[in-house]
Image: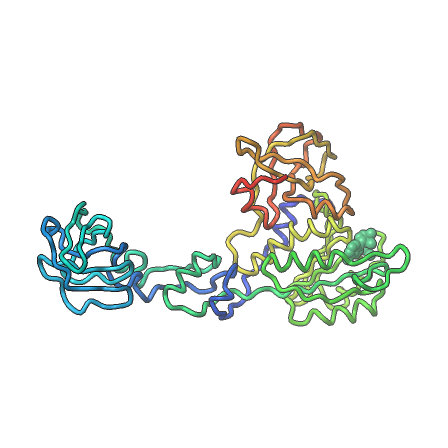
Amino acid sequence: MLIPFEEAIHTVLSGIQSLGSERITLADGLGRVLARPVIARRAVPPADNSAMDGYALKHADQGAALPVPMFIAAGSWPERTLGSGEAARIFTGAPVPEGADTVVAQERTERDGDGPVRIVKPETLGANIRRAGEDVMPGDSIGQVGQSLTPGLIGLLAGQGLTWVDVVRRPVVAILSTGDEVHEPGDPLPRGHIVSSNSWALAARVQEAGGIPRYLGIARDDRASLDAALDGITGADVLLTIGGVSVGELDFVKEAIAARGGEQRFWKVKVRPGKPNAFGRIGDVRWFGLPGNPVSCDVSFLMYVRPALRAMQGHAHHFLPTREARLEHDLRKRVGFLILFRGVHHPDDAGDLMVRTTGPQGSGIQSSMAKATCLIVAPEESEMLRQGSRVRIVMLPGEVGQAALGVRRP
Ligand code: AMP
Ligand code: MG
């Protein structure tokens, strides 16, 4: 049965919950997802402090020459209250003494050696004082469940003196290649045989998606070899098998999964590339049977597996971001399928995104994935997309920032 993409992804995501939590050091936090809310326990900044190198004083005293009996460096604490008609020498980050309500930057003052200071350009009341708690107050909610740890958030948590954080566990993703013709890179390659390039691409995709790849090697096209390899899924959250499930193929993968009591479902989705996909579970391990053709394999990962891995990690957003771009050339396609062409996008002189295909688009053309910065979405019902027309593009991981910054590509 041919089903639309929406139905397939709905089936994949339904029932997926975020995995349990683990406590990690903040240094390992980048990209992880908060599993517990974080409530501030400290005020930031902890005390009123100076935003400038200059003089702390009373606003009303700015007309007179002021003696400077106090010296407050960052890291010290004022030993007394500032009196009327006095100024305190103060530096950026140093606590403002009681009695002072304004800091005047040194560029606005004149002073001879250790003599009194004169304010040349007076400041407004309260100038250059960073107030205690103006950034964060104790009790503020500074991290929500599901929030990704960005460098900014890591800084905010570190500012609270936190050295650890509770995040959602990363899914362990077992990867198994299949095929009598498939070999490890570096191993002798008999005539007509190929290297298991997909497992390398997938392991990298898993890492990018926040998962932990566990490579199970290559199973031959026989039950014994598959059964032995599948023993390696213990403790994994996800199993990706590559190849061996297409129609007319030897059906060992299906058999081996069934023999372990796995539920399985096979479908043809109205999306190309991505010919036959299988999906199911063996106990708690979610199984994706990905096609062997390199482009189909990679695109299927991006379409179905990546959102599932994101959901398992508790991310709020599961899908790759999309943008609108203008086609640099006509694009002909088959009606009835949503086609994802591999594309290269770049901003034109006006900053509008332009996109063209990477060249040959066969499902075995791995170089198309290596060149691609995006996938061009050609809707199911269309037959011809014209040069200059607007299309949706799916940004490939790692390409979003460049496009957003308008970085030019050659
Ligand atoms: P299959 O789905 O097993 O029929 O494989 C479809 C195509 O993908 C065949 O041309 C295979 O040789 C190729 N293929 C299968 N597994 C891999 C792999 N791990 N890396 C690269 N190509 C593969
Ligand atoms: Mg095969």
The residue located at (77%, 54%) in the rendering is 292
Residue 205 x/y as whole percent: 65, 56
Residue 88 appears in which quarter of the rendering? bottom left
Q: Is residue 98 left or right of residue 193?
A: left
223 sits left or right of 64 in the view: right
Residue farthest to the front, as pictured: 113
Q: How many marks?
A: 0
From the viewer's perspective, is residue 331 above or below residue 247? above
Q: How is the image coloured?
A: rainbow
- 408 or 251: which is nearer to us? 408
Question: What residue lies at 74% left-to-right and 68% top-to-bottom?
Answer: 230
Image coordinates of residue 41 in percent, x first then y, are 33, 67
Between 41 and 113, the one nearer to me in the picture: 113
Q: In the shown orientation, is residue 65 left or right of residue 284? A: left
Q: Residue at x 77, y 51 (%)?
A: 293
Whether residue 243 is visible here, answered yes or no, is no
Q: Is residue 8 visible?
A: yes
* Front-most of residues 108 and 275: 108
Find the residue positioned furthest to the right.
191
Q: Position of residue 331 (x, y in %)?
A: 70, 32
The image quadrant where one finds ligand 2 is bottom right
| Figure quadrant of the C terminus | top right
Could you say where residue 162 lies in the image, as x and y percent from the top left? 40, 68
Picture quadrant where residue 39 is located:
bottom left
